[in-house]
Image (cartoon, rainbow, N blue to C red):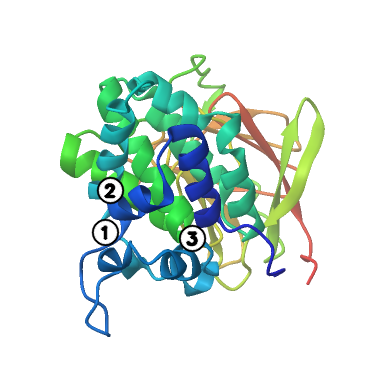
Amino acid sequence: MAPSQPTPCSEFFCFMKKHGGISYKDLAKMILSGHPLSDGQSPASRVNDRSWVSRYVVHAPVGALQKDFFCPFSISAPRIVARLKAKKGKSFSSEQIMDLICGEEAESIMDALAGFHQNIPLYRNTMYRILNEKGFTDYERAEIAMVLFAAAACTGNVRFAVECAIDFSKSIHGVGMSTPMLTPVDSGDVEAGSGSNARVVSTTLGLMRMMDGYVVGNTHWIDSCKGTLEIGAMAMDDDALNDVGMDVSAHHARITRAEDGTWMIEDLGSSNGTFVTDGVTGIESRVIATDAGAHGGVIEIHPGDELRFGTTTTFAVVEGVPEA
């Protein structure tokens, strides 16, 4: 990694100074922890040491920046929101804060996160749910979004940031994040059940995203050793498939390899449905959703089939060997 490459944290400090009018020192006061480290001093006690803050926080390599340097983002994010709202001369409304951290100005932080191989679809899916959750007030929405934004930028870890935002949403505001409802879904011709033409397929299955009849992006291969894949807007397994539309549930569906080598898909209680179009017959079937504490239906899938999640996301099922 080139030494000159901007880190998400350095971009965050620049962003808050340029667009929020918060100086590096003031931002450090709001986000650094008062808990003593191994040397007996806390990060917060060093905010007046500009060289230390610059070297060990603002411009620290992503892998070297310790989470212990930061106070809980459930504390620092509301501080930042409150500062923006109380800013002299040009205070921000909750809507303006959302526009700021979801707008083009924040793309430099997204680029920096992508440069360190972070899961940007997972981040964007979570932010979209925050934006569209009707159970939040505008003020709550701004605080939850700031938790996600600040945690991702400061730690360089999108999965950790999503967990922080979910925990904050539930523990502080008592509201989760539901799947946005778009166009009503047609339930299809046939409801879930195992296919009658059982075929043993390759132990390496892949999904190719389809849009308007064209393949977009790279094939997402299922780990042949693990034999399972979760699909969802906020699924957080290392190999989860997050490249999905906004009406796909947080934890939408799971593909699993059976003992005989066949592959099955299960709906995890999604809001907008999981559908399988048979590559031979062209018949679309809906997978019966899993109820809480119970097993739902599954459908056997094969190369050549198409999978549709909600109304906006379609994948073609393929088999092959992933490139090393």
- The answer to whether marks 2 and 1 mark residues whose Cβ atoms lie closer than 8 Å is yes
Give the vertical position of 247 relative to 68 (above or below). above
Whether residue 118 appears in this view of the structure is yes
Residue at which label 3 appears: 58
Residue under the image location 58 percent in, 33 percent down: 105
* In the displayed structure image, the side of residue 175 where residue 199 appears, left or right: right
Q: Tell which of 286 and 171 is nearer to you.
A: 171
Alpha-carbon span between mark 2 and mark 3: 16 Å
Residue under the image location 21 percent in, 41 percent down: 170
Residue under the image location 31 percent in, 20 percent down: 134
Q: Secondary structure at mark 1?
A: loop
Give the vertical position of 208 relative to 128 (above or below). below
Task: First in sequence, mark 1 or 3: give its number.
Answer: 3
Q: Quadrant of the C terminus?
A: bottom right
Residue at which label 2 appears: 76
Which kind of residue does numbered mark 1 sit on? Cys
Q: Secondary structure at mark 3?
A: helix
Q: Tell which of 306 and 174 is nearer to you.
A: 174
Alpha-carbon span between mark 2 and mark 1: 7 Å
Which kind of residue does numbered mark 3 sit on? Val
Q: Residues within 10 Å of mark 3 (few under 14, many from 20)?
A: many
